[in-house]
Amino acid sequence: AAVKGGLRFQVSAALKEGHVTPTELCQSCLSLIKSTKFLNAYITVAEETALKQAEESEKRYRRGQPLGVLDGIPIAVKDNFNTAGIETTCASNMLKGYIPPYNATVVQKLLDQGAVLLGKTNLDEFAMGSGSTDGVFGPVRNPWSYSRQYKEKSVPKSPSEDEESNWVITGGSSGGSAAAVSSFTCFAALGSDTGGSTRNPAAHCGVVGLKPTYGLISRHGLIPLVNSMDVPGILTRCVDDAAAVLGSLAGHDPKDSTTIQDNFKPFELPNLTDVSKLSIGIPKEYCAPGLSSEILAFWSKATDLFKSAGAKVIEVSLPHTRYSIVCYHVLCTAEVASNMARFDGLEYGHRSDVNKSTESMYAATRREGFNDVVRGRILSGNYFLLKQNYEKYFIKAQKVRRLIANDFVKVFGSGVDILLTPTTLSDAVPYMEFIKEDNRTRSAQDDILTQAANMAGLPAINVPTGLSERGLPVGLQFIGQSFQEKQLLTVAKWFEKQVKFPMIQLEVKRHDHSAFQHQKSASFS
Amino acid sequence: QEVTVEVLDHLERLALVDFRDAEGVERLQKAIGFADQLREVNTDGVEPMDSVLEDRCLYLRGDDVTEGNCTNELLKNAREKVEEYFVAPPGNIPLPKLEERETFLQGS
């Protein structure tokens, strides 16, 4: 049966009307995952369980009783979320072979809604990084590296240079999830966001990346990096889908005492037509050193777009912006030092053969299990937490954190509804170039625009905006007020409609064409 | 200032993670240098912020047992176990001193 074409059509509707079945959809996605293996987006593909879930979903559709808009929808989950019976590695030797006995709350919620879990996606080891290049399973490749748009614009510098060496990174640390969504292997994916780890790869892979307000979505089962900043992130191909996934995930969880107790009501996004009552703030400090002129141009054009649509656009100041990355560096390493202490080989994960004493076994286990990046952060964190350093580094950083959070409070208090900023400093760089600098330097550079939202716990979203000179995605970021996701997403959706970001023209060998039509739909909701 | 070998050794013991090589130590030095920029910020009269949710009450549930009896599941992931116990090597034995430990810092 023919299905409506166009940029966006609704897979959920197609499932309801029987134009495609959950098993067909699932099989098509699994097949595409195989065809796109070179992207290295997935660490584990849960083929059997996914097909079972798809079958169950199909039974429900046949009875006319789907659980909701997510029933039968293939999704992927970043490999730092615990998934019962499915290996969860955090892309680290420390957890290779670790099979959790429980599902993270967000995973359970998705499964309860009938979503089909295709597999676990690749990331930087323990979510530390901004490239998805530092995990033990290797780097993730940006699907846009294989797009016609990128290939048309790339001029090989030498006859020997070819596709193989030219591929660009996904950004990180939720690169696998972003690549999975971008390459149509799933309709939505979970990532995590501590300093920008969902928005950064979303920008580089041309997908929507939502960082919800801290406290809105449960972190139970998300292997923690920085307890006071981590949030589960949502990656989808359009803003409406992000709202749908948010609707099924948000809300108080008795198992996570940092989730707020307010009643959360899932919402549908209105089609905003009149933005004249909107006040958009443009923080001048986000014109950061290193910001590419291309991105600056996109940012400018977006500002003009809002202005000509009648919105009030004003320049604002977040004076402590340039310290947020330093502050993050201290608080992050300190919390990491604490969080990584649980990995000692006794109860789960890798355990060294060294058996002389508990201390030496722990030391050897951690020596063998963690990579340089993780070890480096643990050691730095411990340094900042030493008695002689506690006050001048850790406490100091906590004070600066308050100043950063207050900057936002002041700006929003002055009548600004939403902030508009770039998400990244440039489009995705080639892997060969990215690895020339070390992880800490890269993270410090790349997190600069996304990180402050985590400091202040605010919701933020990357919306794909356009293609760069090199044919790669560029995104812009909207930062909203605490727990005002509906407003944030409404504005984001309006913007998305205006910019009409092009669909990726992925050049991949396809095995079957029929169900692929459904996969290429930008949205499911 | 440079971090002394004593502090480096102390860190290795506290963290139970090793520096591995000169690069590891260099990494720490750079991290400290980077963090030193915090000194430029005036934080007089500013209270440290633990959590962005500081104005709210954390949820505390009732002191009731709601789950448990999952010994088998929990033991599944451990490498060394005996009956219902996780088996650890002997405790109370401190990590060998710097001179006796296999660590990069020995050479310094």
Image: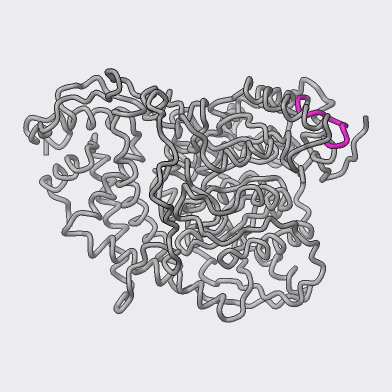
Specify whether A511 is left or right of A415: right
Which quadrant holds the N terminus of chain A? Answer: top right
Q: Closest to the observer: B18 or B25?
A: B18
Residue, x 80% and y 21% (percent of image)? A512
Residue B50's x, y, as percent?
Answer: 36, 63
Give the answer, above or below, for where A255 lies relative to A360.
below
Give the answer, above or below, for where A163 lies relative to A168.
above
Residue A155 visible in image? no
Residue, x 38% and y 47% (percent of image)? A440
Does A21 lie within the magenta span? yes
Residue A154's x, y, as percent?
Answer: 67, 39
The image quarter in which residue A386 lies? bottom left
Q: Residue furthest right?
A: A1
Q: Closest to the observer: A328 or A349?
A: A349
The image quarter in which residue B73 lies? top left
Residue, x 47% and y 44% (percent of image)? A220
Q: How is the image coloured?
A: one colour
Boundaries of the magenta span: A16-23
The image quarter in which residue A53 lies? top right
Residue A18's x, y, as percent?
Answer: 87, 32
Specify whether A9 is left or right of A239: right
